[in-house]
Amino acid sequence: DTAVSQTPKYLVTQMGNDKSIKCEQNLGHDTMYWYKQDSKKFLKIMFSYNNKELIINETVPNRFSPKSPDKAHLNLHINSLELGDSAVYFCASSQEASGKHEQYFGPGTRLTVT
Amino acid sequence: SQQGEEDPQALSIQEGENATMNCSYKTSINNLQWYRQNSGRGLVHLILIRSNEREKHSGRLRVTLDTSKKSSSLLITASRAADTASYFCATGGLGGGGNKLTFGTGTQLKVEL
């Protein structure tokens, strides 16, 4: 009954490959996010979807493409992986319709590009 | 560039002592939040304070916000070993961007027995 879940937890792949990370939330929230946390623990927002509509799109290479099939899911596809993509990627969700800005985070996906 | 800078970067205290962490930010905000991250885990929301609030309490946590100085502090009273974690402040933007969070650099807290 995990609130925000991500798969896989660990992902090791070679440069140039394409990979996807999946996220699901069972909180009934209307907004979902992807964050990237680097090796220095700096956390930066990448994307946000509200009711399946993209509302935040930070300066992220277009090799990263989010997809939200429904309100409960937000997946992240990464093309042509590079060494610099190695990081921990966190999914999060919040209920913005009620004005609540608290975000609930998933456990993270540690991506290692070799 | 980063919105929030946290101070100190690392803090080591004895169990039972109070821990104070500070956060400074650069632009006007809608809200400021504090999160905890245990090693190898996701972030856990602790407390949210809105820009028109000055102080908020939740259990052993006390948060203050000074919008004139663009700063906030998180006080954890009577710390426990289980409080050992990294603590991040995050600011939500104005207008419809209250949920667009910009995170600080984090404070690593170690509570020793």
Image: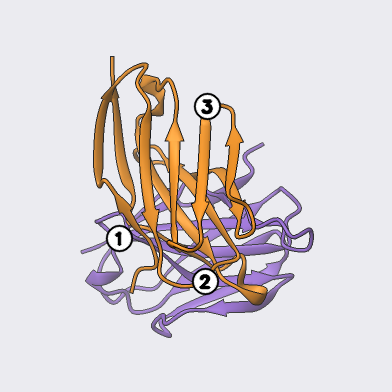
Chain colours: A purple, B orange
* Callout 2 secondary element: loop
**Residue B3, x across and y down, in percent:** 39, 67
**Residue B86, x across and y down, in percent:** 35, 41
Residue tagged 1: A38
Cα separation, mark 1 vs mark 2, equals 26 Å
Q: Please name the residue shown 37% across and 16% down the image.
A: B16
In depth, the one of A28 and B27 nearer the eye is B27
Residue tagged 2: B28
Question: Does residue A92 appear left or right of residue A15 in this picture?
Answer: right
Q: Chain of mark 2?
A: B
The disc placed on residue A70 is none
Rendered position, B86 above or below A56: above
Q: Are marks 1 and 3 on the same chain?
A: no
Task: Residue at the far bottom: name it.
Answer: A62
Cα separation, mark 1 vs mark 3, equals 30 Å
Crowd class of label 1 (few under 14; some 14 to 19; many from 20; radius 10 Å): some
Image quadrant where one finds the N terminus of chain A: top right
Residue tagged 3: B60
Image quadrant where one finds the C terminus of chain A: bottom left
